[in-house]
Amino acid sequence: QVLLVESGGGLVQAGGSLRLSCAASGTIFRLNDMGWYRQAPGEQRELVAAITRGGSTNYADSVKGRFTISRDDAKHTMYLQMNSLKPEDTAVYYCSAAIMTGGFVLTNYWGQGTQVTVSS
């Protein structure tokens, strides 16, 4: 069984920074593409940033230049550095990862989410 656990969320003032982490545990053969999503109240879940196994990244237009996604495969961990935070960044942030387990089966997993609240 594989688990994804996010951490690092919290309350921050506008203009501040937070660093989210997503740690994968369990029987992991290989981490493939990974990403951060967010969902604000009453809104649909949206992609914030994604990173491939090779390290290629892409970002939502709303966070370009402010957020940076990275990964450390040796630690089975993905990060999201969030700078210059705005009140509209307030949401529950989820990590997602395509993980190949010991049976060579590729499955997409989700974390439980971490709340990020940006006050004005």
Image: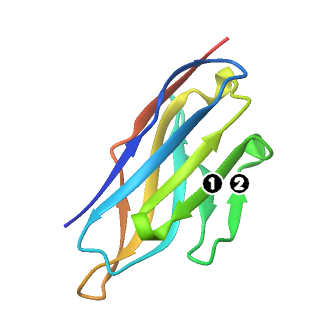
Q: Is residue 120 above or below residue 82?
A: above
Can you tell which mark lies on residue 59? 2
Question: How many other residues sit within 10 Å of disc 1, few (<14), some (14-19) or many (≥20)?
Answer: many
Residue found 55% across the figure and 39% down from its top: 19
Q: Nearer the viewer, mark 2 or mark 1?
A: 1
List the single residue furthest toward the bottom: 104
Q: Are marks 2 and 1 in contact (CB under 8 Å)?
A: yes
The quarter of the rendered structure image containing the C terminus is top right
- Asked if residue 44 shows in the view, the reply is no
SS under mark 1:
strand
Residue with the mark numbered 1: 69
Q: Nearer the viewer, residue 113 or 65?
A: 65
List the single residue furthest toward the right: 65
Picture coordinates of residue 63, whole percent (x, y): 73, 42
The quarter of the rendered structure image containing the N terminus is bottom left
Look at label 1 and name its amino acid. Answer: Ile
List the single residue furthest toward the top: 120
